Amino acid sequence: MVLKITKLKKSLKRIIKDYYLVIIATVVILVFFILGINFIISLHKKGQPSFQEKFVIISFNKVLYIDKNVKHPDISEAIKSYESGFVEKAKFLFNAALQKSKHPDVKKVAYVNLANIFDDNGDYELAIEYLKKANTLAPRDGIIYHNMGIVYKHLKDNKNSILAFEKAIHYNRKFVKSYLSLASLYFYMNDFKRSYKYYEKASKLNPRLYEALYNAAICQFKMNHFEKGIEQLEKIMNSQSVTPKVRAESAKILGTHYTGKGDHEKGLYYFKKASEIYQDFDLYYRTGVLYTLMGNYQQAMESFKKAYLLNENDLDTIRQLAELYYRFGDYDGSLKYYKYLLDTQKVKSEVLLTMGEIYYKKGQYADAVEYYKKALDVSLTPDQSKIVHVNLGNLYSTMNDYDNALEHYQKALELDNLDINVYYNMGVLNLNSKKYLLALENFKKALEIAPSNLRIHLLLARTYLAMNERDKAIVAYSHMIEKFPKEVTVYFELATLYYKLTKYDQARHYYEKIINMDPEKDILYKVYLNLGVILNNEKKYQQALEMLKQAYSLNQNDPYINYNTGIVHLNNNNIDMAKDYLKKTLRLKSDDRLKALVHLALGNCYYYLKDNKQAKSEYDIALKYDPKLTEAYFNLKVVKNSYETP
């Protein structure tokens, strides 16, 4: 009879494999957390409007002073030179006009335009001096005051700048640029109420000046008048007479507003609207960010790809693509972008960590080791360094290089001697190397730090089992039951241990407790199966069949259920039923050991039916699958002897 239990060696390998996956997942989470910080910073930079620097379209504009009544040749030539970019020539000609002419209008034009040239060169004090000279010649000229306001703004003299613009408006009420410049000045001073007032006046002078309406809407947002701002931006966005750039910017602001409020659906709607109006890298990037936040990674990938086509050098976009390819399991695609980041970034730690992780997942352990070691050569936080050493330990362990593995685990402990995961890894490594005393030491140390860690308690008990210290293992399991009274795994392993010791009453006691704990099906069917085997050993065949029937109802694909059902029928002399179940077993996927046992049992069936020829055939097959199956070897000799007996 065979009890359906997992051998200790296989169990340990599975634990090691599962734990490495846990470590990998931990590192992935850490890396994505680190990269996520950059992601959020990137989102803040690209997704939150910096109104003062990015979205205010209209700023301060000086005016080239042209007076149609001035017919001086030097002035005309100087203006042409200035407009063509020959500033030094223009400067020379304006000064020549001052030397040659005493006419006030000529001098006024020369002074104002020379002031513009000085302003361009950063000679603001000299520019003001020349504008004042022009002002004495034309004290009611709004253009002079307008340019004076611009220069005062460059001098950061906001008080005199405001006074100059106000006089410019007073003397020239229809000059829109003065209203716009004053509105911009108030905006930069965070006086959004006055800024809005002058943007409104500018738009009344020129209703088609949608840039002014746009900036007025931004002022509404800055004053928390969101409904008015939204209404105004939507009008601009939907107006076909507005330039595509301004319409797209309006939609972008609305998308940013709703994104900031956490309404990702509306934010996405407006970003998509903006991208329909105007093809822009930033819009595709923002759309990708929103899709990512919403968990729609495929759409995020498409958006970031479009952004990448418009700007192949944007590191944030490249990072997002690298992370998305990683998420989709396309490690080669991810590596392509991470390698680019590695070549272009100064801070490489996160990229190196992730590349090491990718190579780890690809099974390219030598490459993973290389990149983890490279990560140790750059600036890492203590936590990052510890993770690298743990993963290097895991890698070397996978490569059966236990000395290097233990060296890196030890380095991890030097960085954090309270990390139970490191003690766990060292314990698993020592257990796998059959260094049981060291494994016990590691697990006990881990339990000092985390006494409620079930996983380590289980490994401690399994280490005692590996040492054949079954009494100590029973004590460990009993302690676990007291500490974790609802953990099915503990009851199952203790019951299985009692079964191995042929202490069937104790085994049955714990298996029956499991049934009352409402366990998962994967555990429950094994409990019924094992109870069936115990009852069969006790020759309680009908009860055994009832248990095996329960197991079959929960899992019809486990070959051990059919096998043990066949064994019960065989023991109860129901040979035909036994044969049926044993043959069903052979149609299910199983290992060579079980196949050998099935053919042995079939051989016994045919022997009882006195079909020695078929019995011999089954015993021969059993020995092919397991040459060390002594019962098959013995039975084969019996059958052969029956041939030889006259």
Image (tube, helix red, strand yellow):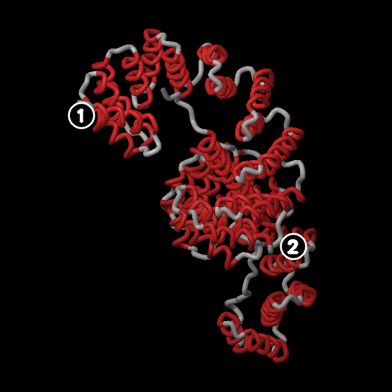
In the picture, which quadrant includes the N terminus?
top left
Instruction: Name above or below for residue 157 compared with residue 37.
Output: below
Q: Which residue is mark 1?
A: 613
Bin the neighbour count of mark 1 within 10 Å (Cα to Cα): few under 14, some 14-19, many 20 and up.
some
Residue 49 in view of the camera: no
Specify which label sits upstream in the sequence, 2 or 1. 2
Q: Which mark is residue 47?
A: none
Q: Residue at position x 48%, y 27% from top?
A: 5
Residue 427 x, y percent position in the rendering: 66, 41
Q: Which residue is mark 2?
A: 164
Instruction: Please identify, in this view, whether the residue under mark 2 or under mark 1 is nearer the observer.
Output: 1
- In front here: 212 or 207? 212
Give the amino acid type for the residue marked by disc 2 in the picture: Ala
Q: Residue at position x 45%, y 25% from top?
A: 4
Q: Secondary structure at mark 1?
A: helix
Give the amino acid type for the residue marked by disc 1 in the picture: Lys
Residue 369 x, y percent position in the rendering: 59, 59
The CA distance from mark 2 to mark 1 is: 118 Å
Residue 516 x, y percent position in the rendering: 53, 11
- In front here: 593 or 372? 593
